[in-house]
Image: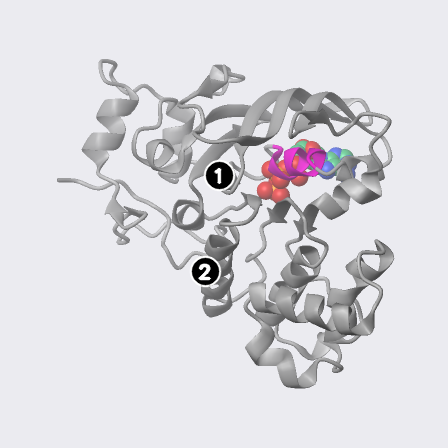
Amino acid sequence: MKFRIFRSAEDQTGSGPVDPTETPRMGGQLLPEATATSKAKATEEPRAYEASDLPGPTVVDSPPVGPIKIAARDVSVFYEGKQALYDVSLDIPDKTVTALIGPSGCGKSTFLRTMNRMNDTISGAKVTGRIAMDGEDINDRSIDPVLLRARVGMVFQRPNPFPKSIYENVAYGPKIHGLVSAKSEMDGVVESALKRAGLWDEVADRLQSSAMGLSGGQQQRLVIARAIAVNPEVILMDEPCSALDPIATARIEELIDELRERFCIVIVTHSMAQAARVSQRTAFFHMGRLVETGDTEDIFQNPRERRTLDYITGRFG
Ligand SMILES: Nc1ncnc2c1ncn2[C@@H]1O[C@H](COP(=O)(O)OP(=O)(O)OP(=O)(O)O)[C@@H](O)[C@H]1O
């Protein structure tokens, strides 16, 4: 059996070259060329990928099972009038990791930001369409974006701890949102968030030390602890491992897997291997459009769209 070229599992950033010697794997399973090709286009001869194929229709491979946390309908985003995202409709299930994949500039981060109204903070950005969380329109005038961002936390590419102590980084959110007043209660919140972020054992004896003295991977887990401390319902992650080494990346990936028991997680990643490892649902974007979405296993093993197949097998992007 032949195997398609696939990004190396060690390629954590997704920016490295495709490794032709790497055996492709998806959730411990191989990605056989025969399966990917025959099911993608069972009766058609593969044809060359052409720019005129774009833009294509959205294909919903299989609807998610279980409760939907966020439902996006016909979401478009414009920057200074220039359209960056076109009519994206996507259901994001609760207690699941959904990976947003696609080549640079396809709109992954733009779509991610629509879910906690971070695009509101970009001057000249305009969002149309509807995004509902638990059935409630998050763009409704009655929704306070600051409170929304506590419910929908965000972790960025580069760890961005505040230049304060480890303790203060975690305590900051509960304090400003008035969730906790007593010091003893705050101690409990900080400890619990650090434990859930898998950092407690490494920092318990230096909570008053500066967060800036932590390693990059520890800082990223601290930022995750900071997001968790305000009891969010959703955690958005924009390439959270791209600035980390493989060991720190593996630790964050384990953490993501643990966190999905309690949270709805959406992760933007350039690494196909990472998307395959950490997510249960995948959405593939190309040129501002959602091309295909479905269970991660289906997207990687039986993509329906030629563009998806070309991307996941490293032909472009
Ligand atoms: N603040 C902004 N102002 C103007 N245009 C923007 C802004 N942010 C993104 N864009 C444009 O919107 C399009 C989508 O960008 P976006 O960052 O969402 O893509 P992406 O898929 O996340 O890319 P990458 O993988 O490189 O981060 C691009 O053409 C980009 O140049």
**Magenta stretch: dominant secondary structure:** helix
Residue under numbered circle 2: 254
Q: Secondary structure at mark 1?
A: loop
Determine whether, in the image, residue 256 is placed left or right of residue 80. Answer: left
Q: In the displayed image of the protein, which residue is found farthest to the bottom?
A: 205
Q: Secondary structure at mark 2?
A: helix
Q: Name the amino acid, label 2.
A: Glu
* Residue 109, magenta (yes or no): yes
Q: In the displayed image of the protein, which residue is found farthest to the left?
A: 1
User: Looking at the picture, does residue 120 appear above or below residue 149?
Assistant: above
Tag count: 2
In the image, which residues are magenta? 107-115
Q: Quadrant of residue 111?
A: top right
From the viewer's side, name the closer residue of 75 and 265: 265
Residue under numbered circle 1: 317
* Spatial separation of the CA atoms under disc 1 and disc 2: 26 Å
User: Looking at the picture, does residue 205 appear above or below residue 253?
Assistant: below
Determine whether, in the image, residue 292 is placed left or right of residue 117. Answer: left
Q: Can residue 172 be seen here?
A: yes
* Residue 141, magenta (yes or no): no
Q: Residues within 10 Å of mark 1 (few under 14, many from 20)?
A: some
- Residue 77 at x, y percent in the picture: 72, 25
